[in-house]
Image (spheres, rainbow, N blue to C red):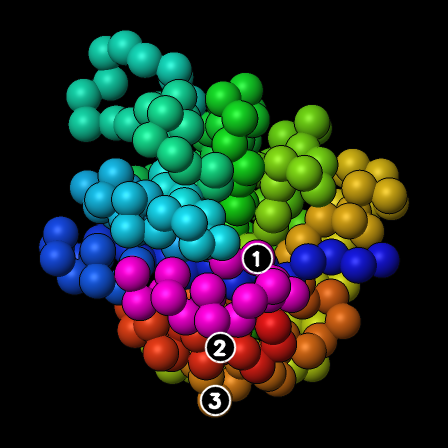
């Protein structure tokens, strides 16, 4: 089963206009140098930069994504952004259920699933994030927590064309700490097994599962060469084009 590696940058709440445009231009130039890359590239800037980054990426094989979306198409939801608006701006992806949104905005599995359905209806692909806290890991609950998140957050009509899963241990995000390659392999295999139960074996075998959590140029190859790891969701290191591309070049 060939699953195209996805190298995705989550810029989080970083970047003013000039920084964002410069970063996007550097990434675009580096991806162009690769010619016909083996991988798919994606950057997910904050909402405020989407339009300018889209322009900066013109002609480059780098997709644009957002970091969240509401489940409604429009209406009385002050401060929110709808999937239709993101599609209109040129986004093809949206990250949903990132642990920072689950923690800061109390997002439940049910809400994430509702957002994913709305994203599909508006032609967006989703990256649905799951992952255990340090306490849950210490208690031996990693697989159980991730399984419940998959069962609750991934809609029944998810398939490999509209959904990517990102396994991101919460304790590894932005900390410099990472699980061992063996741990990552074990969780990804378990996640694929749960996806098979929920969506069928054929869909599960085609669906990409990314690893995220302190991915850096120095550890990228170790994670990205694991059999069930189909790419990376990169936070901090995606803010430097050289680091982002060094991670990509370890496999692309
Ligand atoms: C993330 O926020 O999705 C992430 C993986 O961050 P970092 O790479 O900084 O750990």
How far is mark 3 from mark 2, CA to CA? 8 Å
Res. 185 image quadrant: bottom right
Q: Single out the residue that lies furthest toward the top.
A: 75
Q: Earlier in the sequence, mark 3 or mark 2?
A: 3
Position of 80 with respect to 130 (left or right) is: left
Secondary element at tag 3: helix
Q: Which mark is residue 106?
A: none
Does the stretch in magenta take in 31?
A: yes
Residue at coordinates 30% horizontally, 73% vertically from top-left? 240
Q: Earlier in the sequence, mark 1 or mark 2?
A: 1
Residue 40: which disc? 1
Foreground pick, 240 / 107: 240
Q: Residue at x 71, y 42 (%)?
A: 160
Q: Is residue 53 left or right of residue 173?
A: left
* Residue 197 visible to an observer of this rendering: no
Ligand 1 under 8 Å from disc 3 Cβ: no
Q: Residue at x 49, y 77 (%)?
A: 247
Residue identifier under label 3: 218
Q: Is residue 243 visible?
A: yes
Q: Secondary structure at mark 1?
A: strand
Q: Which residues are magenta?
A: 25-41
**Could you tell me residue 21's position as x and y percent?**
21, 56
């Amino acid at each position: 089963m060939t699953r195209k590696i996805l190298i995705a940058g989550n810029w989080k709440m970083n970047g003013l206009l000039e920084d964002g445009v410069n970063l996007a231009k550097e990434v675009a130039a580096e991806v162009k140098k690769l010619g016909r890359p083996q991988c798919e590239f994606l950057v997910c800037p904050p909402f405020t930069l989407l339009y300018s980054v889209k322009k900066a990426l013109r002609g480059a094989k780098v997709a644009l994504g957002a970091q969240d979306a509401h489940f409604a198409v429009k209406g009385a939801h002050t401060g929110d952004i709808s999937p239709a608006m993101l599609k209109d701006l040129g986004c093809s992806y949206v990250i949903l259920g990132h642990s920072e949104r689950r923690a800061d905005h109390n997002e439940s599995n049910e809400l994430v699933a509702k957002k994913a359905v709305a994203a599909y209806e508006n032609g967006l692909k989703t990256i649905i994030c799951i992952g255990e806290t340090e306490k849950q890991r210490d208690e031996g609950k990693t697989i159980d927590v991730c399984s419940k998140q998959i069962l609750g957050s991934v809609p029944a009509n998810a398939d490999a064309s509209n959904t990517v899963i990102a396994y991101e241990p919460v304790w590894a995000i932005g900390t410099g700490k990472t699980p061992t390659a063996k741990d990552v392999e074990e969780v990804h295999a378990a996640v694929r097994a749960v996806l098979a139960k929920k969506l069928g074996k054929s869909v599960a075998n085609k669906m990409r599962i990314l690893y995220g959590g302190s991915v850096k140029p120095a550890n990228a190859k170790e994670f990205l060469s694991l059999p069930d790891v189909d790419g990376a969701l990169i936070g901090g290191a995606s803010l430097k084009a050289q680091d982002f591309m060094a991670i990509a070049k370890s496999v692309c």
